[in-house]
Amino acid sequence: DQQVKQNSPSLSVQEGRISILNCDYTNSMFDYFLWYKKYPAEGPTFLISISSIKDKNEDGRFTVFLNKSAKHLSLHIVPSQPGDSAVYFCAASLDNTDKLIFGTGTRLQVFP
Amino acid sequence: NAGVMQNPRHLVRRRGQEARLRCSPMKGHSHVYWYRQLPEEGLKFMVYLQKENIIDESGMPKERFSAEFPKEGPSILRIQQVVRGDSAAYFCASSPWRERNIQYFGAGTRLSVL
C-alpha cells in the first residue's frame, strides 16, 4: 500500500531551466510534507517542508506547492544547477505520529 | 556541530550472525528513528525511540529485530540471525522535541549478508 507516490523515476533538465518534481498521496489525513535530497552513499538531506494549512513554501531556489484537493505536491527548483543532480524523495507525516512515509524517489539529472 | 553519526558505514555478515548498527543523534535531539531502504525503493519506517522508551515499533519485523536507545550512549538496532533479505541500507534520523516533523538523517549503514 504505497501511500506516497512519485510516478516519475527519473527527470533530466538542462542547467538554468526549471526542474519540477511531483508527488501524489492517498491519505487525506497527512498534514505535513517534506522533500529530501539524496546523493549516492549518503543519507537524505532535508530540503524544504510544508504544512497542510499552506499551499506554498519557498526557500531560495526551492519552492514546494501543495494542492490538497488533488492530493498532490510538487517541488520546483529554479534555476537548476548541476549540483542538484540527486535522488529526490517526497515524504509525508500525520500529526499524531512521528514516522515519515516516503515515496520511491525521482532521480534528477541536470546537464550543462 | 556534528550531525547524526552512524557506524559502521558498511557491515558484512554471514547468514545466521548478528548485526549491530549504532546511531548517535545530533546534539540536543531526543528523538531517534530508524528506516530501511531496499534497493530501488524508498525509505521504510521501522521504529521511533526516545531515551529508554520505544514509542512506535510498528514498522519493525516481529522477529529477530530489536532497537534500544539507552539513557547513556547511542541507539542500537540489532538484527539477530541475519538472512540475505536483511541486506539493505539502514538509516537513522533524529529530531529535536519542538520540530519533530523534520528529521535529520545520518549517512546510513549498508548491511550485506553473504
Image (cartoon, coloured by chain):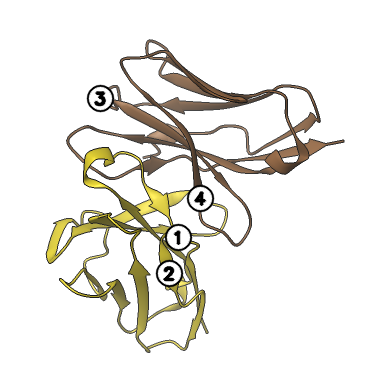
Chain colours: A brown, B yellow
* Dot 3 amino acid type: Met
Measured from the top left, where is residue B21 in percent x and y?
Answer: 37, 75
Tell which tag, 3 or 1, sits nearer the viewer.
Answer: 1
Mark 3 lies on residue: A29
Q: Nearer the viewer, residue B12 or A82?
A: A82
N-terminal of the pair, mark 2 or mark 1, is 2
Mark 4 and mark 3, same subunit? yes
* Dot 4 amino acid type: Pro
Q: Residue at x 51, y 56 (%)?
A: A43
Marks 3 and 1, how far apart at CA: 28 Å
Q: Nearer the viewer, residue B41 or B12?
A: B12
Considering the image in quadrants, where does the N terminus of chain B appear?
bottom left
Measured from the top left, where is residue A48 in percent x and y?
Answer: 47, 32
N-terminal of the pair, mark 4 or mark 3, is 3
| Label 4 secondary element | loop
Q: What's the chain of the residue with tag 3?
A: A
Marks 4 and 3, how far apart at CA: 24 Å
Residue A57 numbered tag:
none
Mark 3 and mark 1, same subunit? no
Q: Residue at x 21, y 66 (%)?
A: B62
* Dot 1 amino acid type: Gly
Position of residue B5 relative to residue A61, above or below, is below
Residue at the far left: name it: B53
Mark 4 lies on residue: A44
Measured from the top left, where is residue B105 in percent x and y?
Answer: 43, 54
